[in-house]
Image (cartoon, helix red, strand yellow):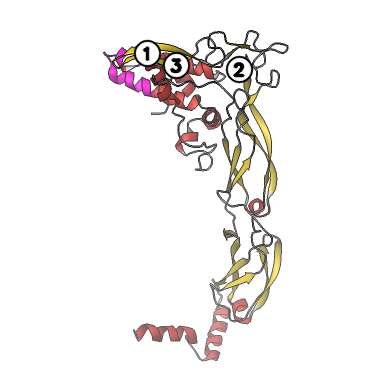
Amino acid sequence: MSKRDYYEVLGVSKTASEDEIKKAFRKLARKYHPDMNRENPKEAEEKFKEANEAYEILSNAERRAQYDQFGHAAFDGSAGGGQGGFGGFGGFSGGGFGDIFDMFFGGQGGFGGSRRPGPERGSDLRYDLEIDFKEAAFGKETEISIPRTEECEVCHGSGAAPGTHPETCPQCKGAGQVQFAQNTPFGRMVNMKTCERCNGEGKIVHSPCKSCGGKGKKRAKRKISVKIPAGVDNGSRLRISGEGEAGMRGGPAGDLYVYIFVKPHKIFSREGTEVICEVPINFVQASLGDEIEVPTLDGKVKMKIPEGIQSGTILRLKNKGIPYLRGQGRGDQHVKIKVLTPQKLDEQQKQMLKDFAKATGESVNPEQKSWFKKIFNI
């Protein structure tokens, strides 16, 4: 059975803020908690799990960006050519479990500990980029489009309308948390919980910025120029500093990691910096030798075929391989010779071959004769 859309599960729009998503989840968690649904515990459990899964994705800015771009495929391995598409880092954020614990036991899990709100670095993002074989060899500069959370350009992240400023929360005095006492089997305990007046921000915005709705951040698609160095291969990773998700409370933005995936080439393959290709020749060229044109990454070059060459022989073209990723020079190109056997001969051509065999005095060539001797003397 196909999964429901995560936004539909939580009952929020695709433009919902982090707070709206959290409130929607908490409402569903209370509704479907096992203690509240004794008549249909199995159905409630399924609904609870579904809501928790949706929240784990949408409450994490990085995973939400992946989901917005690829849907459920971002997490089942079917996006990005089987490589995870716009993949993420780590695992689930674990936000669902933490919020449930807070919901029923209060504060930071009921064990106290004050955490003052301060600058927080934004999440890192990952982007999978597919390029051609030659682009991997020689490098390129390209532009990619990244969905991410950015600092509002109008209020510069404060959430307050231009000309106004946020006010320190009078209830928590800017701490973002307040203390509360709780009677437990172990005695009276003083714990901490998120300040309800400022939602843990430590500040209150009386005149919200119209551009971002007072959040200080906005979802946007940003075009970013990526310079791919010569010599990259499958799985190469490029780090672009400061191009990830926006930080919180004045914190720095995260980084963007671009993972490279190289399309297969019709002619060439590679092993490290070495390029390999197969070149067919006819039996006359193999017997008498020749000078032929061979494809390389730089275009066609001439190569001498020595007479009497055997099928499967590998010849080398120096410095025609992949440039070294870190350093000067290039690898080599290895040309594997494939001798083609003629087909659909006419009677005259067949007779010419018979005459050739007769002229050599051998019905079987000497090398093959030696091979048969080895076999039957075992």
- Do labels 3 and 2 touch, CB within 8 Å? no
> Callout 3 environment at 10 Å: few (<14), some (14 to 19), or many (20+)?
many
Task: Residue 223: name its quadrant.
Answer: top right
Check the picture and name the quadrant holding the C terminus. Answer: bottom left
Residue 367 location, x and y as percent? 48, 84
Please identify, in this view, whether the residue under mark 1 or under mark 3 is nearer the observer: 3
In the drawing, what numbered circle is on residue 31?
A: 1
Q: CA distance from mark 3 to mark 2?
A: 24 Å
How many residues crowd mark 1 within 10 Å: few (<14), some (14–19), many (20+)?
A: some
Mark 3: amino acid: Met
Q: Hey, what amino acid is under mark 2?
A: Lys
As shown in the figure, which amino acid type bears the numbered disc 1?
Lys
204 or 172: which is nearer to us? 172
**Residue 44 position (above or below residue 292):** above
Q: Which residues are magenta?
A: 35-49
| Residue occupying the point 55% across, 18% down | 17
Label 3 residue SS: strand
Where residue 51 sits in the image (x, y, percent)?
41, 21
Q: Is residue 304 visible?
A: yes
Residue tagged 2: 215
Question: Which badge, 3 or 2, comes first in the chain's sequence?
Answer: 3
- The residue singled out by tag 3 in the image is 192
**In the rendered image, is residue 5 in sight?**
no
Q: Main secondary structure of the magenta part?
A: helix
User: Residue 215 in the image: x percent, y percent?
Assistant: 61, 17
Secondary structure category for the residue under label 1: helix
Please provide percent x and percent y for residue 343: 54, 71
In this view, which residue lies farthest toward the left? 39
